[in-house]
Amino acid sequence: MTKNDLRVLCTALGFSIVITGDVPQNKQALRATTMAGLIESFCKTSLPEIFAEEPTGPVLSGSDTERVLEYYIAELRERGSSRLDFDRKILLEMYELLLTHKVRLANREFYDSASNDVIANLVLQMAEQRIRHEEQGGKS
């Protein structure tokens, strides 16, 4: 089971608890996600070895490519090898996900300590670079 699978399962369990309980309709989504978080926290506390390699930074969405990548990494970890017989699009998406993770790990201190002004200035600089690149006929 991947970490994303656990999150889906915890959310489903949280939803089940809310539906069977007496929760006002306008608070059901909040209660379900709260219960999912509690269930996931319990699982992480009870089985910490499974969650020892949690990435820092924003949590990635649960795309199909991420699930394929998680499966590939799990198989590689378990067997020592795994086939990469995917099409070019998926291989490039897997590469981009791994590259993003690598950058996050390399910049962990920045993510933890940079001020909003520093981050805003960097976003502005990179956006301006992208605009210049596009104006010169490059792709974004």
Image (spheres, rainbow, N blue to C red):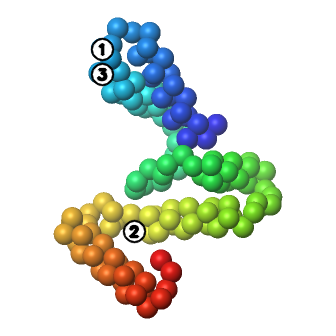
Spatial distance from mark 2 to mark 1, Cα to Cα? 43 Å
Marked residue nearer the N-terminal end (2 or 1): 1
Label 2 environment density (alpha carbons within 10 Å; few <14, some 14–19, many ≥20): few
Q: Is residue 71 left or right of residue 61?
A: right
Question: How many discs appear?
Answer: 3
Q: Is residue 118 left or right of residue 88?
A: left
**Percent position (x, y) of residue 56?**
42, 55
Q: Residue at x 61, y 63 (%)?
A: 93
Q: Nearer the viewer, residue 75 or 63?
A: 63
Q: Residue at x 75, y 63 (%)?
A: 87
Residue tagged 3: 27
Circle 2: residue type: Asn
Circle 1: residue type: Pro
Residue tagged 2: 107
Q: Residue at x 26, y 63 (%)?
A: 113
Marked residue nearer the N-terminal end (2 or 3): 3
Label 1 environment density (alpha carbons within 10 Å; few <14, some 14–19, many ≥20): few
Quarter that holds the N terminus = top right
Res 3 quadrant in image: top right
Mark drawn on residue 61: none
Residue tagged 1: 24
* Element on which disc 2 rests: loop
Spatial distance from mark 3 to mark 1, Cα to Cα? 6 Å
Do tag 2 and tag 3 residues touch (Cβ < 8 Å)?
A: no
Do tag 3 and tag 1 residues touch (Cβ < 8 Å)?
A: yes
Q: Is residue 20 left or right of residue 113?
A: right
Spatial distance from mark 2 to mark 3, Cα to Cα? 38 Å
Do tag 2 and tag 1 residues touch (Cβ < 8 Å)?
A: no
**Percent position (x, y) of residue 117?**
19, 69
